[in-house]
Image (cartoon, rainbow, N blue to C red):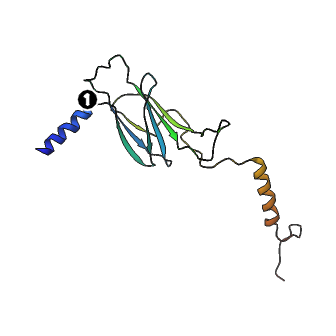
Amino acid sequence: MKKIFLLCLIYCLQVFGENIKLINNSIYPLIAEIYDASGVLQASIRIDKNQMHIWYSDNSPFKNNNDQPRTPYSVHWLCMPNAEAKNKDGEKNIAEFGVWPNVPSGATVTSLGSPLGSKTCSTRVPKDKETDQKTKDKTNGFNNWSNDGGQTWTND
């Protein structure tokens, strides 16, 4: 009896509740942001690489909120913010990985299947040119350890 009740409950959630299956099939951990038709953020979910999440809305047909459009949704896949990469205002830079516009309820969206976006995340923090030049100067002296004008060593 409990199994039948549980199956009915799952079926009712799928029929009456709006849901979107989110699949992160990229090599990066990503954030999936779900926006409704009016552009209001509904959820922000962190999904690790090669993981899946099913999002259920709190919207039900029994609520009196018919004046608010919900669908179609749009799903924005965002790269995880790099703690060291910040913009001029000190805010974290969050790059957009991909965007799925016009997503109906019950749809499955994948990160790499996004029709819009770069589908890549930066994993390297950009360095200052000055710091990069100092590092280059230090390594040049080290790599040229023979100090003989670039001649190769011979074993006589």
Q: Give the residue furthest to the bottom.
A: 156
Image quadrant where residue 10 sits: top left
**Residue 59 in sight in this render:** yes
Q: Residue at x 54, y 35 (%)?
A: 117
Image quadrant where residue 105 sits: top left
Q: Mark 1 is on which residue type?
A: Phe
Q: Residue at x 87, y 69 (%)?
A: 147
Picture coordinates of residue 118, whole percent (x, y): 56, 38
Q: Secondary structure at mark 1?
A: helix
Vertical comparison of 69 with 82: above or below = above
Q: Give the residue furthest to the front.
A: 90
Q: Residue at x 62, y 47 (%)?
A: 84
Vertical comparison of 39 with 146: above or below = above
Crowd band around label 1 with a 10 angstrom C-alpha radius: few (<14), some (14–19), many (20+): few
Picture coordinates of residue 54, whole percent (x, y): 35, 40
Q: Residue 2 or 50: which is nearer the viewer? A: 2
Q: Give the residue furthest to the right.
A: 149
In the image: residue 142, left or right of residue 17: right
Q: Residue at x 79, y 55 (%)?
A: 134
**Residue 112 in sight in this render:** no
Q: Which residue is mark 1?
A: 16
